[in-house]
Amino acid sequence: MRQYELTVLIHPDLEMNLQPALDKVKKIVDDAGGKITKEANEGKKRLAYKIAKQEFAVYYYFELDLPDDNKMAKKVASNLDIADEIIRYLLVKVDENRLKMEAKRKERKGAADTDSEESANNEEE
């Protein structure tokens, strides 16, 4: 499985009832054999320029895992292209080097946290 990030701009008229649009995105990912690991509603924002005669859109962010086969990512993209609820989307692969760097940072931070706890315990004694 390969990790991807998907940002979707949903039509602003659907702001009050996002669930059908989100269900459609989730179904597209499931049909491609993927799994959504994280999702976040970024809210309604003004666009830099009009898209499909709209000045605003609801931004929704997903982190997902898709099979290593590029055909599945293309399948997700082509299905998102024809979805009426979605004005725009951006599907990108997560850089594996970035993931390694983040893991190292967390590891260092965890080590630093345990060191500071040990020094605080030593000072108490």
Image (tube, helix red, strand yellow):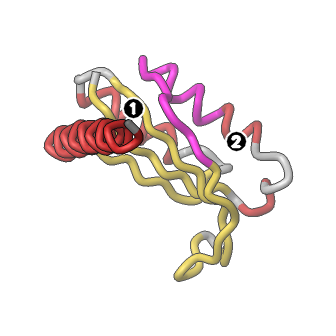
Q: Residue at x 26, y 44 (%)?
A: 112
* Label 1, residues with CA under 10 Å away: few <14, some 14-19, many ≥20: some
Farthest-out residue, left? 97
| Side of 125 relative to 109 (left or right) | right
Q: Position of residue 70 (x, y in %)?
A: 24, 30
Q: Residue at x 38, y 47 (%)?
A: 91
Q: Residue 95's quadrant in the figure?
A: top left
| Side of 2 relative to 85 (left or right) | left
Which quadrant of the rendered structure holds the C terminus?
Answer: top left
Tags 2 and 1 touching, CB below 8 Å: no
Question: Residue at label 2?
Answer: 21
Say if residue 94 shows up in the picture. no
In this view, the mark in front (2 or 1): 2
Between 31 and 16, the one lying in front of the other is 16
Q: Residue at x 49, y 52 (%)?
A: 7
Q: Residue at x 66, y 78 (%)?
A: 55
Q: Residue 12's quadrant in the figure?
A: bottom right
The residue range painted magenta reads 24-40
Q: Position of residue 120 (x, y in %)?
A: 37, 43
Q: Secondary structure at mark 2?
A: helix
